[in-house]
Image (tube, rainbow, N blue to C red):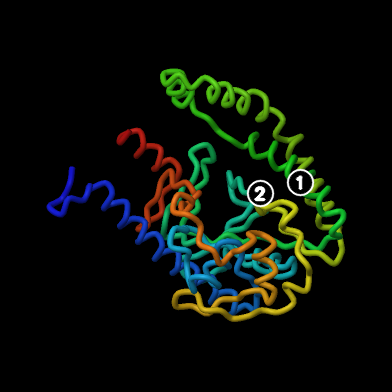
């Protein structure tokens, strides 16, 4: 169906939803920034958020998330305020039920509902991702990162939950490879959950006891590129981001060059896409998992 201007209604609705989501995301970032400054917690804009600050002075137009780094002491101080954040915000981490992002913390708008991936039944809300930077010896960081990736990979698959309806749907659609992958998650990985969790916690302990002149983001996507020089995070620079002045690491140029190369070059149109899932989204109120499942049953 199209409107009188020739727009497809579904496209118009999607565009409006994306705009509302980005506005809510920026509102959440403003609350996070204010919270950190009030409690003297230092953060650094990270990844696409850092590119956005430097290249666009705000969100990258096709981006739909905000990431920051924190040094260990600030990260633990931040987590200590879980359940004590004023207003309709809170902190989520691995202490929350079914939280599957392991050592990644989130600053969440609790008046919104976001269930990102169907196979991980965890409701967050519009959020800011907080990545911890750990001190480590640059030479040891690569081996530690490999061990951490292996452990977190297995644990993540053990946490996946697949329903009978999903198995039936895959068979009907002839998606047999995915069907057998789900079987593997359910009958091989899940029974080993406790073993995988122990291996993961052992890796975390090794990371926590490590020391050195490098700073490493073990939860980032760029592996060996995320071994940073400590001096690049020595100071904070205030940089404009939409209507905010946010915290940016003093070595932002070196960091972004190491991660992305020529970060000021805008990628081709086909690569200007978001990489995040929104299995269920409501920007107006909080839903429970049970309420969402009932809604999905009635509307699918």
Mark 2 / mark 1, whichever is N-terminal: 2
Q: Is residue 162 left or right of residue 296?
A: right
Instruction: Tell me where residue 145 appears, x and y as whole percent.
Output: 77, 49
Residue drawn at x 74%, y 65% as measured from the top left: 72
Q: Label 2: few (<14), some or many (≥20) within 10 Å?
A: some
Can you say whether 120 is above or below 132 in the image?
above
Kindly report the distance in space between the C-alpha atoms of the residues bearing marks 2 and 1.
11 Å
Residue placed most toward the observer, 233 or 283: 233
Residue drawn at x 49%, y 72% as measured from the top left: 31
Instruction: Tell me where residue 156 appears, x and y as whole percent.
Output: 64, 39
Numbered badge on residue 102? 2
Residue drawn at x 55%, y 69% as measured from the top left: 85
Instruction: Tell me where residue 54 appears, x and y as whole percent.
Output: 55, 72
Name the residue that disc number 1 marks.
148
Can you say whether 31 is above or below 222 in the image?
below
Q: Secondary structure at mark 1?
A: helix
């Amino acid at each position: 169906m199209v409107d009188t201007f020739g727009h497809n209604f579904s496209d118009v609705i999607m565009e409006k939803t994306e705009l509302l989501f980005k506005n809510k995301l920026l509102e959440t970032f403003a609350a996070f920034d204010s919270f950190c400054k009030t409690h003297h917690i230092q953060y650094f804009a990270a990844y696409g958020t850092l590119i956005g600050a430097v290249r666009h002075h705000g969100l990258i137009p096709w981006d739909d998330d905000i990431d920051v780094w924190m040094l260990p002491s600030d990260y633990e101080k931040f987590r200590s305020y879980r359940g004590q954040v004023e207003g309709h915000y809170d902190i989520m981490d691995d202490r929350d039920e079914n939280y599957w992002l392991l050592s990644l913390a989130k600053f969440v708008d609790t008046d919104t509902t976001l269930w990102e991936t169907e196979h991980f039944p965890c409701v967050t809300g519009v959020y800011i991702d907080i990545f911890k930077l750990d001190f480590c010896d640059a030479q040891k960081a690569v081996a530690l990162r490999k061990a951490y990736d292996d452990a977190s990979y297995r644990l993540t698959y053990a946490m996946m939950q697949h329903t009978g309806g999903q198995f039936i749907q895959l068979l009907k659609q002839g998606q047999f490879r995915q069907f057998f992958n789900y079987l593997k998650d359910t009958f091989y990985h899940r029974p080993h959950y406790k073993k995988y969790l122990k291996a993961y916690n052992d890796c975390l302990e090794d990371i926590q006891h490590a020391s050195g002149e490098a700073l490493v983001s073990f939860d980032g996507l760029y592996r060996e590129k995320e071994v940073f020089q400590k001096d690049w995070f020595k100071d904070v620079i205030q940089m404009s981001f939409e209507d905010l002045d946010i915290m940016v690491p003093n070595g932002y140029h070196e960091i972004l060059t190491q991660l992305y190369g020529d970060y000021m070059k805008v990628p081709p149109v086909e690569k200007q896409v978001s990489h995040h899932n929104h299995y269920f989204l409501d920007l107006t109120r909080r839903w429970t998992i049970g309420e969402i499942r009932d809604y999905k049953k009635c509307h699918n």
